[in-house]
Image (cartoon, rainbow, N blue to C red):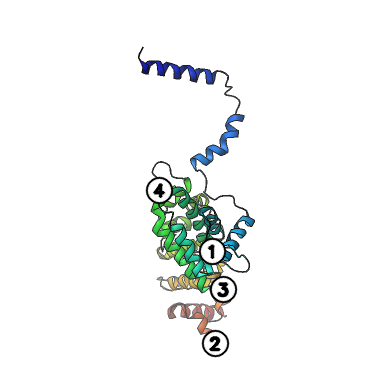
Amino acid sequence: MTSLDRLHHALREANAAALADLDVRDTSILEAELPQLQRWTAGGTGIEEVSDDEVAAAVKAYRRDGALDGVGQARLVCYGCTREIDGARLIEEPERMKALLEYVERYRYFVRPFRRCYRALLHAYFSYDPEAELSEKGRRGWQELWVFLERRKNLLETPGSDPHWVTALLEHRNLLTRDPTSRYGMQALRGNFGVFDTVRERLAIPEDSWLQRRLAFSIIEAAIQLPDQHFKQAVVRLLVLLARQPLMLDYGLARVLDRYAASKTKEVHARLREVAVLNWGDPRAESNLPHWKGVKPEAREMVAGWLDAGGG
């Protein structure tokens, strides 16, 4: 028997001895080891459990010291950069936000620490709404964050061992483009939100993220490309959608009215007329014309005609 044969024989005996007393019906050992296995395989969304106190302390220390003390603190500050701490948000503090991104950039060739910081920044990116917050500095900070995430996403990939969230992001690279949601627009218009909901869950994107508003925009854009008959069948659904997205109501309603006015027939659509007049007033009144400036003249005239026909 050669040395290699003896080694094989010893390994077989060791395996047999290790398995001899194992009760395969007892899952307690596997259950106990499951958390560690999940960490090893990097499953889930990649969002780490960090306490509010830890995040707040890290942000306050960063503001106080003007520097970051290691990648551990940097990760916590990344999670906290969009949170209001002591009445302010880091993303609205240009110099500190820039320095944070530059610090994370140093780790770009060290995959694990870089990914942990990137994951926290990605969560911040989808959580901060630059339109709702009405902060010019916040918009600029959010824009710089987007540039960082878009340019560095390919550094996340380690073929064969990517965490699930990395796989999801790289499969949906559109989420970090200027047009993050048109990919899902037509499916969502038809009532199929499966693909969008799945990727949102895999990346732990908040339900109140600005991305939901962009999806509504993409649904409207998909609808206005439909033939007249199918578009008109979708109008009520679009109005319901707009009612849930007040920040894009004016723009979206104008798009719907312009498309309706461009159709071959312009029969009265009572619900569309009511929503338009409720939001912008009677288009026949000169004092209301500034509210109607977002629509084409033919759309405004169409609604005025509907009001005349209905005795409004």
Instruction: State yes or no: discs 2 and 1 in contact (Cβ < 8 Å).
Output: no
Mark 2 neighbour density, 10 Å: few (under 14) some (14–19) many (20 or more): few
Residue 182 visible to the viewer: no
Which numbered disc, 2 or 1, marks the residue that appears first in the sequence? Answer: 1
Q: Nearer the viewer, residue 67 or 124?
A: 67
The amino acid on which the numbered mark 3 sits, given as a three-letter code, is Glu
Label for residue 157? 4
Quadrant where the N terminus is found in the figure:
top left
The numbered mark, 1 or 4, whose residue comes first in the sequence reads 1
Q: Could you give the CA–CA distance between mark 2 and mark 1, rounded to whole angstroms?
A: 37 Å
Q: Residue 278: horizontal and vertical position, in percent? A: 58, 76
Viewer-side label of 3, 4: 4
Kindly identify the residue that appears in the image at 51 percent across and 60 percent down: 126
Q: Estimate the spatial distance between the alpha carbons at disc 3 and disc 4, rounded to whole Å.
A: 51 Å
Image-quadrant location for residue 23 = top right
What amino acid is labelled 1 in the image? Tyr
Indicate which label's residue lies in the foreground, 2 or 3. 2
Quadrant housing residue 53? bottom right
Nearer to me, 310 or 138? 138
The answer to whether marks 1 and 3 mark residues whose Cβ atoms lie closer than 8 Å is no
Q: Determine the CA span between mark 1 and mark 3.
A: 33 Å
Q: How crowded is mark 1: few (under 14 residues within 10 Å), some or many (20 or more)?
A: many
Name the mark on residue 287: 2
- Marks 1, 4: nearer the viewer: 4
Q: Position of residue 21 (x, y in %)?
A: 58, 19
The first of marks 2 and 4 along the sequence is 4
| Residue bearing the label numbered 1 | 128
The answer to whether the residues at label 2 and label 3 have Cβ atoms under 8 Å apart is no
* Separation (CA) of disc 2 from disc 3: 18 Å
The residue labelled by disc 3 is 274
